[in-house]
Image (tube, helix red, strand yellow):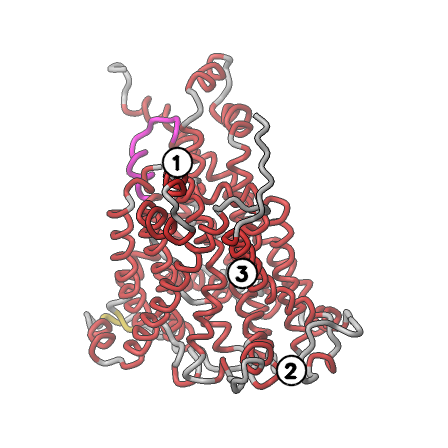
Amino acid sequence: MNKRTFLQELNRQKISYLFIIAPFLLFLIFVLGPVIASFFLSFTKYNVIQAPQFVGITNYKNIFFNDPRFWKAMINSAFYVLGVVPLGISFALILAFAIDQRIKMKNFFKGVLFLPTVTSIVASAVIWSWLYTGGKYGLINYFILMKLGLQPIDWLMSPTWTLPAIIIMSIWAGLGWNVILFLAGLQTIPPMMYEAAEVDGAGFWSKFFKITIPLLKPTIVFVTVMSTIVSIKVFEQIYVMTQAGGGPLGGVLDCALTGVPYLFDKGFNKFQMGYASALAYVIFSIILIFTFINIKFVKAKVEY
Amino acid sequence: MAMRKVKRPSKTIIFIYIFLIVATLTMLIPYYWMLITSVKPQEEIQTYPPKLYVKSPTVQPYRDLFRLIPMGRHLFNSLFVCTSVVLFKVFACSLAGYAFAKHKFWGRDIIFMMFLASLMIPWQVNIIPGFILVKNLGWLNSFKGLIIPTMGWGAFGIFLSRQFIYSIPDDFIDAARIDGCTEFKIYLHVILPLIKPVLATLAIFTFIQQWNNLVWPLVITTTREMRTIPVALAALSSQTSSNFGMLMAAAVVATVPMLIIFLIFQKYIIKRIVLP
């Protein structure tokens, strides 16, 4: 070992570098490089045609103090997250608990709930836009609202209902994933706990609230933070459903414009690349906060 | 041992079944409505009240789909991009995973940590500079632009294969070395056969993810001919105000291949997600 020179050692290691070179170079060029470049770009004014022009922190200043559309997007994002996460997680938890009981066809129920996860969000959004079709021809309007004696709603054209409609679709699309995670968490609860509770005469709901929820806490925190991050990043369903049939991106009066669609609009419709990069970093920082919460609270999950 | 009790299902169990059946219907009805609309003639789509069944099914929407927009070309684009990315990720990531798991070289841990950290990078921060880079390379609207930058996101595959290769005993590898195998042959003949199940999972996941990916191809493609299926579907949706049969036929084409893959590999997919 001590005889080995630097060059000999490098020669021995050559093969290892050869093994990692392709993914590593592509990673540096197309992932890491752009992310760093984006940071510098966020301090410039850049419209793709002329060279970028350094403007200091003007972009960030404008975002926070001079951009009502940004705040509209943040409020919509918050509304979306608060709509999707608590409801989505409650449904998923109850469904996972139900599937975990002594019932038949567990795999069938799991599989059905998981279907939207393997369907592209674009396809799901297209299907749901059709379910939401306005007037009395839409499936949801006719078979749910009108059968209940309510007036049909023009879901995706109405400033009030666009975002709630997208929230409902997103809960549907994300349910299966969360159910599978909860089911995995439920396997860690020893069956003895339930048996002991049954001996003491506990019913379905008291088992659910007294045993399942407390023991499942780590999984619940994990799933909550994960779905919060996913919801902050939402793009596809907003892009498709607000533009279904030719509407503007973000819906009528920006009623469903959330953070990422706004960033997309600034970058690729208005070609304000510097400003959009700054927006990307603002959104990235928000996501990062939640990522760190996740790592801190769910250490065990990360260690594998 | 044979303690058979004839038990009537309790009220709770019946309640659970009803609940699960309602949930199942909620999940399935959108798919059903998509399928049924895609085989309805135009008159039946626009009747009032809407019907849950179809009286005289037709394949006209599918014919329209392949005649009015280049759906065959979109299918080819999606298949070509997905296959290239999957092949690269499966082989390049597992090869790198082998080096990270079993080799010692300078900078190994730092490089691996960089990959791990990159799992936290959302595409949203990457999309604008990524677009500018691809534009400057002259790769806009080309397969190069669709495929090669996507290959940079290999961190998950590397992480996954490293974890599994790490658990392979060193003796296997040493024995092969003594037999005079080169490192690449060890990877090919010792490592690859042992991690086949993991690579299959990685391949299925990458394929589904690529097939469904909207944003990158949306930004990179500028002509209709280069669009992948999600981009074409989103565009079609924004242009459709009456021909919903054709739109749903497009949704069927986008959805069904993945549903088939899922049904074949169901157990595999669900089991692996939770603990990669």
Query: Is B255 displayed left or right of A287 in the figure?
Result: right
Three-letter code for the amino acid on which mark 1 is drawn: Met
Q: Chain of mark 1?
A: A
Residue range (magenta) = B101-114
Work out whether disc 1 and disc 3 sit on a shared chain. Answer: no
Please give the name of the residue rendered at 69% of the width and 69% of the height, measured from the top-left corner: B36
Look at the magenta stretch and give its main secondary structure. helix
Where disc 1 sits, the SS reads: helix
- For residue B265, what is the image quadrant? top right
User: Is residue B219 depicted above or below A34 in this figure?
Assistant: below
Three-letter code for the amino acid on which mark 3 is drawn: Ala
- For residue B44, what is the image quadrant? bottom right
Query: Is A67 displayed left or right of B222 in the figure?
Result: left
Q: Which residue is mark 2?
A: B242
Where disc 3 sits, the SS reads: helix
Q: Chain of mark 2?
A: B
User: What whole-number distance in Å separates the C-alpha atoms at marks 3 and 2?
Assistant: 31 Å
Q: Which residue is mark 1?
A: A192
Q: Which is in the foreground here, disc 3 or disc 2?
A: 3
Q: Can you tell which mark lies on residue B23?
A: 3
Residue A256 appears in the rendering: yes
Q: Looking at this view, name the residue that lies furthest to the right.
A: B56
**In the image shown, does A76 or B131 lie closer to the viewer?**
A76
